[in-house]
Amino acid sequence: MSKFVYMFDEGNSGMKEILGGKGANLAEMIRIGLPVPYGFTISTEACNSYYAAGKSITSEIEFQLLDALNRLEEKTGKKLGDPVNPLLVSVRSGAVFSMPGMMDTVLNLGLNDETVEGLAKLTNNPRFAYDSYRRFIQMFSDVVLGVDGFYFEQLLEETREQKGYSSDPELTADDWKEVIKGYKDIVKKRTRKAFPKDPKEQLFLSINAVFDSWNNQRAIVYRRLQKIPGHLGTAVNIQGMVFGNMGNDSGTGVAFTRNPSSGERKLYGEYLINAQGEDVVAGIRTPQPIYALQDEMPEVYQQFVETCHLLEEHYRDMQDIEFTVERGKLFILQTRTGKRTAQAAIRIAVELVEEEIISKKEAILRIDLDQLNQLLHRRIDDSYERRPLTMGLPASPGAARGQVVFDADEAEALTKDGKKVILVRPETTPDDIHGIVAAQATVTSRGGMTSHAAVVARGMGKPCICGCESLKIDLKAKQFKVGEMITINQGDMITIDGSTGEIMLGETPMIEPQLSDEFKLLLTWADEERKLGVRANADNPEDAEKAFEFGAGGIGLCRTEHMFMDTKRIPIVQDMILAETYEERTDALNKLLPMQRDDFEGIFQAMQGHPVTIRLLDPPLHEFLPDKEELLVEVTKLQMTDPNSKKLKEKEHLLRKVRQLEEFNPMLGHRGCRLGMIHPEIYVMQAKAIFYAIAKVMQIGIDVKPEIMIPLVGHVNELKEMRQLVIDAGMQVTKETGQEYDYLIGTMIEIPRAALTADQIAKEADFFSFGTNDLTQTTFGYSRDDAEGKFLQSYIENKVLPENPFAVLDQEGVGQLVETGVKLGRQTKPGLKTGICGEHGGEKSSIQFCYDVGLDYVSCSPYRVPLARLAAAQATI
Ligand code: ADP
Ligand code: MG
Ligand code: MG
């Protein structure tokens, strides 16, 4: 017989697969002697067997469950359904990976018209007993019977108004009795059945509901987002209740052991006096900050602080803890590794090393690279003088701009249309999750730093402001007011700063991100570990400087055509292309040369002696000419209005040239080294510009390590000819300037034939750089520009391909060519320098692959350099 049910003292934190995260940690906390209400866990395997049996609890599981219930009753001395001494339990979902708020929980189960009186007598607190009962009806009806909480809220609000109360704690026992009667009527009306009285029936229905919640819409969306597999199932925890709603010596709260937004080592959390767990997270009442507990209940606070330390040390990481105080006694109800922003993750990892809790290697491995993008977010320009409309709680850092929307569906739809939106809600529920995903940021007027919106936004690295109570939101009118004077309508632009809580009207200027001191330190640890070099792709001195600042060990790809695209240069480039004679062409090239030379000088200076790989012209020439259709329109117009003009002649000439250069398949057309082969003077000009720059920079005493790269080589003869061209240009410049220099000449491997004949190509190459963008295009035979918009999306959705091969290197196919290229190349030249310069150079699994096949370096955009440094270290450890 397999075991499906585990008492809390039979488990430990290593059993997450079976007990779910919540159950395993509850067991672990009991094991280390913390005050946790006793209970048992029905395993994730039971959930799977529930689904296998067509959504029913098998008799085997039922038997084990009733046995566990007996043991819980023995331990507590109470009995489920006993009118004198009733046992009340919570039924809590708990998946293997935490899915906060995504699945359901029922509290105070076991209450009915009889047991509620027992509870009232036993505790000598009828008000509390009836408050618990109405909570139970409300939660059970919502979770199990599918009656929307709204009906209950509405009735409660009416009652409050009628009696002139402003908050729930003012209701007396008799008031609650009345409410309960109303609640039961609601259930009867909505479900056509009476509310179930039998506690065992209540229990089984709740367990079913928790199992069912594994497959509710929002849980499915969340799993897809977080890449959590659907077959894992959820466990169910049945736990004796403790009560935070017994009066002013009771309460409930949640706290992170460190600030999940900034990482600061300071307790961060909230609590509510005289309330039950759900109240804090639901954002119905805005809670007190945790430090206020120090004054209100000093002893409990002290004990809580000690427990936090203990849990942090035990789990060796920041924890997110739920607690309840029942008549002055502290209970811990949940602990888990706290979700945090990338910024906090880095600070926490670094400080845990300094506190000697984890090693440097562990700190490096703890950083989730997917999350790091957050740090590369822009923020509001410091020099901008802020005039905030209003302020809320800074719940998740980062700045965002967008149009105001008030509805999650609308946020999603507008985003699909390419709009940037900010979702503004009174509060969010798990049903709004798609809106939070779509929006640039979320703002709520109610709820604290641990409210649903805050937790979800932080997890996704999206800016968020919570509890902005000065916003008077009118969902019907689609507007919010700040004070009497200011009204913001749907569609108006606002800017928010999730790090400060400020909301501003309009669009404020933003600046690029910078690295924190902790991040820099962590990166130096990563540099000590990694064996893979990290370079950046940069085409101008500014990018080169940024790359250097972010720790790039050189430039892996400088695309010279980007230097041609400048508005001042493009007419000269066009002259060069349109030239009819050799003289005209060299004339234009001579004008371009000094411009390119100056760019190279700037880049060499920025890189201070680190290698710089410069690729000679790559795209087809017609990319520099105007669009054919537009030209045609212009020409036709001129033919009618000004048929004899010089302008018309010029345009006609241009049009002829455009037509002449037009290609059926430009991606496979006249580009790369094929340009240099047919128009050697272009490559000669570029090579000379490079050599002049080298000479000049060396003469001012700065070291230069240039690597000149010939693109799109498919046959060794191409490289041989181009190599000679560059060498000749180099000698000529030496002759003119008197400056000697060292440099390398290499090639991109971006055509399958080049990878397959890499042994021959290596004879002419000092280095290889795998251009995996083109290599992916040519290996798959996909034109990147056509594939992504036309069929690739559907391929990925239908799992024809596991991922977009332009984003994540296809290791099986394209990767095999890379591996072959490295192996053959090094057969000819042992120690041949190899790198990668496609988009993939900044993607973590591709970086791991590059390390595994023995590349010397990866090259990526400057902003991804820090990520690549960490990924390279993670690949090594
Ligand atoms: P979630 O996974 O959505 O956080 P939980 O199962 O943790 O759901 O429970 C929701 C709330 O109910 C939490 O605040 C929790 O602390 C509280 N709670 C759960 N079980 C008990 C219990 N046995 N006694 C008192 N409060 C409880
Ligand atoms: Mg919880
Ligand atoms: Mg290419």
Image (cartoon, rainbow, N blue to C red):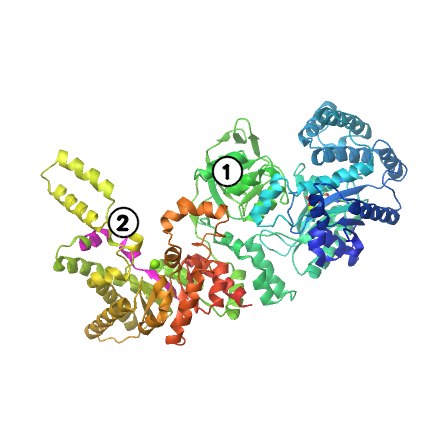
Local crowd size for mark 2, using a 10 Å CA cut-off: few (<14), some (14–19), many (≥20): few
Along the horizontal axis of the image, is 322 left or right of 201?
Answer: left
Q: Position of residue 519 (x, y in %)?
A: 52, 60
Q: CA distance from mark 1 to mark 2?
A: 38 Å
Answer yes or no: disc 1 within 8 Å of ligand 1.
Answer: no
Regarding residue 749, the answer to whether it shows in the image is no
Please check the rendered image and state whether residue 559 is part of the magenta-colored stretch, yes or no. yes
Three-letter code for the amino acid on which mark 1 is drawn: Glu
**Numbered range of the magenta stretch:** 552-576
Regarding residue 587, the answer to whether it shows in the image is yes
Q: Position of residue 322 (x, y in %)?
A: 71, 48
- The residue to which callout 1 is attached is 412
What is the residue that sits farthest to the top in this orientation? 162
Mark 1 vs 2, N-terminal side:
1
- Could you tell me which residue is drawn at 68 percent across and 53 percent down? 336
Location of the C terminus by quadrant is bottom right
Please check the rendered image and state whether residue 420 is part of the magenta-colored stretch, yes or no. no
658, 696: nearer the viewer:
658
- The residue to which callout 2 is attached is 664
Q: Position of residue 753 (x, y in %)?
A: 34, 64
